[in-house]
Image (cartoon, rainbow, N blue to C red):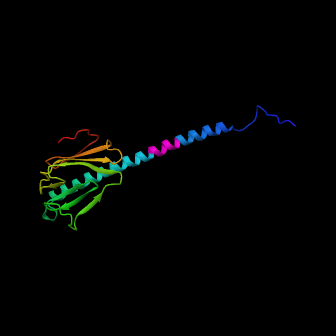
Amino acid sequence: MFISYSKNHRGFSLIELLIVFVIIAILGTLGILTFYQSTRSISLDNDLQIAVETLNKARQYSIDSKNRTPWGTHFNQDGLVLFSGTTFNPSDPTNVTLNLSTYSTFSLISLSGGSDVIFNQLNGSTSSYGYVVVSLKNNPSDLKTIYIQPSGIINVTSPSPTPSV
């Protein structure tokens, strides 16, 4: 008994199936890596937005003389704190603490007031001007810089290799 092989057989060879499987695996890996990076980039943008909104809120509270006191923002590597008063008191129960996502960090805090930006009442200016850099923990070159001007105005740039005031 002979088994005859026909050249007109229908189906796929093992090599063809392996090639398709490898192509699908490569495309899947690229898709997952792209999704992973875009998730981190979105986290950086969200953290930047939270920091800018908190600074603007502190400035506006000072201009409005909310609670008859100046307001400020305290920065640390993992987050920031909205506080009232002329100095930051970490044990004040009225502090509002905002943590950055697990992907972001304040990689550089360069303010004339140390880690605090305190806005003056009525005009919103500050003597604690400078800049704060928000970056991804796993990719420090992916960064955005928040500038706090002496007038109290907040500006954002991206990217900024050498921040200056």
Pinpoint residue 93: horizontal percent, then vertical percent.
22, 68
Where residue 68 appears, as percent x and y from the top left, is 13, 64
**Total numbered badges shown on the rendered structure:** 0
Q: Is 91 drawn above or below residue 126 in the view shown?
A: below
Q: Position of residue 91 (x, y in %)?
A: 21, 66
Magenta range is 27-34
Residue lying at the far top in this picture: please name it.
7
Towards the viewer: 81 or 103: 103
Q: Which residue occupies 79% across, 33% down?
A: 6
> Going by the picture, which residue comes out furthest to the bottom?
93
Q: Which of the 4 image quarters holds residue 73?
A: bottom left
Looking at this view, is 94 or 139 the one in front?
Answer: 139
Residue drawn at the location 16% of the way across and 46% of the way down: 149
Examine the residues drawn in magenta and state their main secondary structure: helix
Work out which quarter of the rendered image holds the C terminus and state it. Answer: top left
Viewed as shown, does residue 91 lie left or right of 7? left
Q: Residue at x 48, y 41 (%)?
A: 30
Q: Position of residue 99 (x, y in %)?
A: 30, 58
Q: Quadrant of the N terminus?
A: top right
Q: Is residue 16 magenta?
A: no
Q: In the image shown, does 63 or 71 lie closer to the viewer?
A: 71
The verdict on residue 29 being magenta is yes
Q: Residue furthest right?
A: 1
Q: Which sits in the foreground, 103 or 147?
A: 103
Answer left or right for 111 relative to 31: left
Q: Residue furthest front?
A: 1
